[in-house]
Image: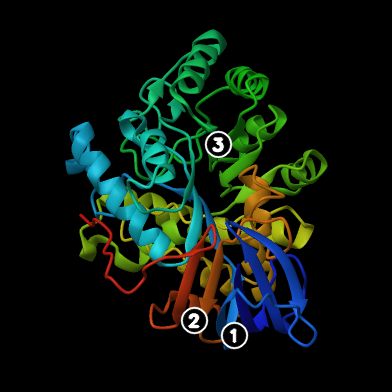
Amino acid sequence: MLVLKVGGLIDGISDELKTNHAILIEDDTIVAVEPLEGAVVPPEATVVDYTKEYVLPGLMDCHVHLSSAGAADPRPYRGESEAFTAFRASVNATATLKSGFTAVRNLGSPYDVDIKLKQATSQGIVDGPRLVASGRCITITGGHGHQNGLEADGPWSVRKAVRTLVKSGADVIKLMATGGVMTEGVEPGAPELTYEELKAAVDEAHHAGRLTATHAQGNTGIRNAVRAGIDSIEHGVFLDADIVEMMLKQGTALVPTLSAPHNIIANGLEGGIPQYAVDKTKKIAEAHIKSFQMAYAAGVRIGLGTDAGTPFNHHGHNSKELELMVAAGMRPMDAIKAGTSTAAQILGLEGTLGRIAPGYKADILVIAADPLKDVAVLQDSDSIKAVYLSGKQIDIHTPAKPAAG
């Protein structure tokens, strides 16, 4: 048995910071969480003293692209070999885990590399976080992400694409309801997959027991996706009150990915980002923040997601999203829940991950300072004292650099 004695405890569900607790771990599972005073510690247990540190569940990112380099201009990287793409994804997975993110949802990769990476991490071949994998996205012919996606037109074509991904081992189906920033020649506000196509995809995925997520920036495309029964809206740039009400009624989650436009605007043309991407981002940035604030104020479920792999949005720096959410008005505790218990709900892992409680997997992050006072501490590698995945401490001291472009 492993026992962690902790000074500050954020359990992923309570609104308060707890103090002076013992976390008892048997194999890969938390078996008890008790106040230090009165905790029964078996004499044969291995005890680790974190009474000067703060402990929270391992963080989760609901939207990453592990096979992407975070390069200023992604176009030269399109068409790489499957092997090279897999090498990059494995390095990025390791960097993500070492930064305290013990689970991620990968929403789109060429060659279905993420599905194969999940197999490699689960077998211990690659050090990486728990992985919920989508494989290739589904888009219209020439639509957003078409370079690495499955192009499908019409409800039956879309159904076949979903079946193809399920056959390949996809955990979640990623759809493209609108255009986006990083695909040249498409507009973020323009709808792409139709309501009928989205409905066919969602129904087919749900029949197969798979959750669904959609890239959706424009208002019409978001509305179509929510009406179709989508499980999570990614980005959600142009929301309105009616859509927010629909999302609340249906339980649709929002993964805002504030990091993606933030990094594009912060680095701009000077950083080598293509003109078309900078121009489109500037047009949507203000609306994006307002939509996030509207959804949060209304009580929509919000999950932490970075879109890591987009320009200057590097793997292993995922915690920046917490700072951006707090800067936009989210309470620090709510931001942490967005990356723990709420993220687990969105990933379909509720009851297993996202909390420090009996019966949950022992995925744990230990940091030197109180993140409720400043969530930016989670970005400081020197403040990260330990990361546990399934009760086993990860080597975070050997440098793990993301495979940048």
Residue 127 in sight here? yes
Q: How is the image coloured?
A: rainbow
**Cα distance between the residues tagged 2 and 1:** 8 Å
Q: Which residue is mark 1?
A: 370
Q: Is residue 208 above or below residue 170?
A: above
Q: Are marks 2 and 1 in contact (CB under 8 Å)?
A: yes
In the rendered image, the vertical position of residue 210 relative to residue 336, given as above or below: above
- Residue 330 in the image: above or below residue 311: below
> Closer to the camera, 318 or 364?
364
Q: Amino acid at mark 1?
A: Asp
Q: Quadrant of residue 139?
A: top left
Q: Secondary structure at mark 2?
A: helix
Quadrant (top left, top right, bottom left, bottom right) of the C terminus:
bottom left
**Earlier along the polypeptide chain: callout 2 or callout 3?**
3
Label 2 crowd (10 A; few <14 / some 14-19 / many >=20)? many
The percent position of residue 206, horizontal first and vertical second, equals 66, 24
Residue 234 placement, left or right of 243:
left
- Residue at 45%, 53% in the rendered image: 129
SS for dot 1:
loop
Disc 3 element: strand
- Give the quadrant of the N terminus: bottom right
**Residue hosting label 3:** 214
